[in-house]
Image: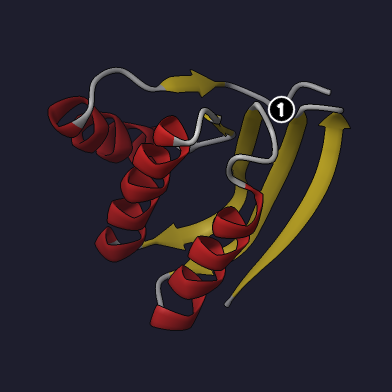
Amino acid sequence: MVSIILRRLHEDQLLVSARGAITMHEDIKQIRDTFGSVIGKYAELQLDFSGVTRIDTAATETLVLIRSEALIKGTKIKLVGLSSRITLLLFVKIITTYGPPHILRSARS
């Protein structure tokens, strides 16, 4: 099960930290609902994956869809703290679908 923590970094920047596994329908729905409630309200959302222990393909597809929705609503998504395996998986999926992502090594406050 995933837990999500929201932390405002600046007036227009929010850090969304995910902890645990993102593999079940309930986890994916929680991620989707959390982002749905903040996309468009901030210029930038950082998704911190440093605490994610496991992620499945349905979750990666959800993240790609969230990124697309954010771009439409004028919100930049930055992926933070990804393992090299998740980085590669998301990079290939995003590049082949939408173009280059913004990926950072650690969260910036």
Q: Secondary structure at mark 1?
A: loop
Q: Position of residue 48 (x, y in %)?
A: 63, 41
Left or right: 7, with 91 as reference point: right
Q: Is residue 57 above or below residue 43?
A: below
Mark 1 highlights which residue?
Answer: 107
In the image, residue 44 sits, relative to residue 61, either above or below, namely above
Q: Where is residue 34, by image quadrant?
A: bottom right
- Residue 70, image x, y percentages: 47, 38
Task: In the rendered view, tell whether residue 72 sits above or below residue 22.
Answer: above
The 10 Å Cα crowd at callout 1, few under 14, some 14 to 19, many 20 or more, is: some
Q: Tell me which residue sits at (53%, 63%) in the image.
A: 31
Q: Quadrant of residue 98?
A: top left
Q: Residue at x 28, y 54 (%)?
A: 61
The amino acid on which the numbered mark 1 sits, given as a three-letter code, is: Ala
> In the rendered image, which quarter contains the N terminus?
bottom right
Whether residue 77 is visible here, answered yes or no, is no
Q: Nearer the viewer, residue 31 or 89?
A: 31
Quarter assignment of residue 9: top right
Q: Residue at x 53, y 59 (%)?
A: 53
| Image location (x, y in percent) of residue 18 | 63, 55
Q: Report the front residue among 95 and 74.
A: 74
Give whichever of 24, 13 is nearer the camera. 13
Is residue 105 found left or right of 102 in the rendered image? right
The x, y position of residue 49, in whole percent, is 57, 45
